Image (spheres, rainbow, N blue to C red):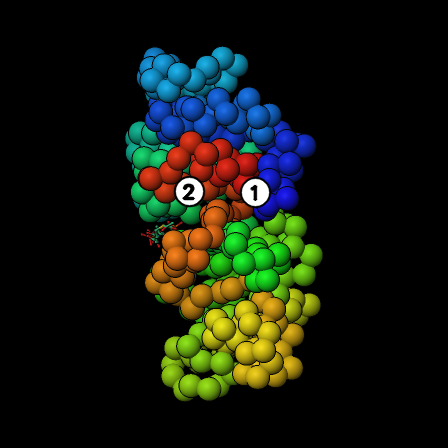
């Protein structure tokens, strides 16, 4: 069973309420109907009921039985505005500004998750990654013990000799442009947790990637990765984690054995941690476009699950992201 099928099975076993702030966006409406039909989650569409119905007609989707909430006319808006004001007043948000934000579907959806009226959120078919991430970072915040919110990409590769039967987890490819060594260490630990809890990987084996393997090159960029390895060992001593190492040393047993002799990870890594966002974002797209991998993104380190879509997403991408969030 593929990783996404396993995640869908899990979602079916325990139906979660997933709020979709872009509720009048046609692909989102069609995805909500598919999620309901598949018994995958309980979707909540945010938006004006007439606009949501029009999007459903455009898609030929039946939205009967799906909750639709209009943030601009919701009885909860005042409660959300007050809570938002309390959360953000120290950052200079006024009561008027909080009321205005609470009527915005993106912030309204985030407040639903924050206050437990929804279990998770999926957005980004219309909003940019930054517009989706900022309210989540400001309001949902990191989970206890986690220094930074980041992302993992689940890469389902056609070459089943790689990782765990073709599954590789890549981090971070979406959020943190230039992580410090400490942030990189937290990203590595979070990615191992994603591999274990979301993908069911029994033994995450984490490689921190570089253009150098075990001191083969000397450079400040290499030193940052070496420091991150040390910090990650202190954060999670039980984790199989090693670096710095090149991609081939991480994945190919013979190269791992020659370049990083004795490493518990080299040659058989299933979690790859990139040194910065340029490398991670380019790396996942190469694996997808040239390597033919299917890929699924998930945010990690947030106190509650919220996930981003690509603006070019399909209905199926939204359904998959709802299941990952659930
Ligand atoms: N983890 C936790 N908190 C964070 C993080 C983080 N990674 N980044 C910012 N924050 C917090 C800040 O501390 C701040 O909190 P506060 O307001 O309570 O003090 C709040 O979030 C907002 O911070 P800003 O500095 O105003 O936010 P910024 O403008 O830096 O935006 C963002 C953060 C959106 C994540 C930015 O780093 C970014 O644009 N990242 C790249 C996103 C992107 O374009 N990715 C590639 C495309 S996606 C793809 O290809 C699939």
Rendered residue at 39%/77% (across/down): 221
Which secondary structure lies at badge 2?
strand
Which residue is more in the foreground, 90 or 39? 39
Residue 164: give its label. none
Which one is closest to the eye, mark 1 or mark 2?
1
**Ligand 1 neighbours mark 2 (CB distance < 8 Å):** yes
Mark 1–mark 2 CB contact (< 8 Å): no
Q: Would you place residue 236 above or below residue 35 in this image?
A: below
**Ligand 1 neighbours mark 1 (CB distance < 8 Å):** no
Image check: 8 left or right of 112? right
Tell me the crowding category of disc 1: few under 14, some 14 to 19, or many 20 or more residues within 10 angstroms, Cα based.
many
User: Which residue is label 1 attached to?
Assistant: 4
Say if residue 75 shows up in the picture. Answer: no
| Spot occupied by residue 191 in the image (x, y as percentages of width and height) | 55, 58
Which residue is more in the foreground, 79 or 212? 212
User: Which residue is label 2 attached to?
Assistant: 308
Which secondary structure lies at badge 1?
helix
Q: Would you place residue 198 above or below residue 262 in this image?
A: above
| Spot occupied by residue 74 in the image (x, y as percentages of width and height) | 41, 18
């Amino acid at each position: 069973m593929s990783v996404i099928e396993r995640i869908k099975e899990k979602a079916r076993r325990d139906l979660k309420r997933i709020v979709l702030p872009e509720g009048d966006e046609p692909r989102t409406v069609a995805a909500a109907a598919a999620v309901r039909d598949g018994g995958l989650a309980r979707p909540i569409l945010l938006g004006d009921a007439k606009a949501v119905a029009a999007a459903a007609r455009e898609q030929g989707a039946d939205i009967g039985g799906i909750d639709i909430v209009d943030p601009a006319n919701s009885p909860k808006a005042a409660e959300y505005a007050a809570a938002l004001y309390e959360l953000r007043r120290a950052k200079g948000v006024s009561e008027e500004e909080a009321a205005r934000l609470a009527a915005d579907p993106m912030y309204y959806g985030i407040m639903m998750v924050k206050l437990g009226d929804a279990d998770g959120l999926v957005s980004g078919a219309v909003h940019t990654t930054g517009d989706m991430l900022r309210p989540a970072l400001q309001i949902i915040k990191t989970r206890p013990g986690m220094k930074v919110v980041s992302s993992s990409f689940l890469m389902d590769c056609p070459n089943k000799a790689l990782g765990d039967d073709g599954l590789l987890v890549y981090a971070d490819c979406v959020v943190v442009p230039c992580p410090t060594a400490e942030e990189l260490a937290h990203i590595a630990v979070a990615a191992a947790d994603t591999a274990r809890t979301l993908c069911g990987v029994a033994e995450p084996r984490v490689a921190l990637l570089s253009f150098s393997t075990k001191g083969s090159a000397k450079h400040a960029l290499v030193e940052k990765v070496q420091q991150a390895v040390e910090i990650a060992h202190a954060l999670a001593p039980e984790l199989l984690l090693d670096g710095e190492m090149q991609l081939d040393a991480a994945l190919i047993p013979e190269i791992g054995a020659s370049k990083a002799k004795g490493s518990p990870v080299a040659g058989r890594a299933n979690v790859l941690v990139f040194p910065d966002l340029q490398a991670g974002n380019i790396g996942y797209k190469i694996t997808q476009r040239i390597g033919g991998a299917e890929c699924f993104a998930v945010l990690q380190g947030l106190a509650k699950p919220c996930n981003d879509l690509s603006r070019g997403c399909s209905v199926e991408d939204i359904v998959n992201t709802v299941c990952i969030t659930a």
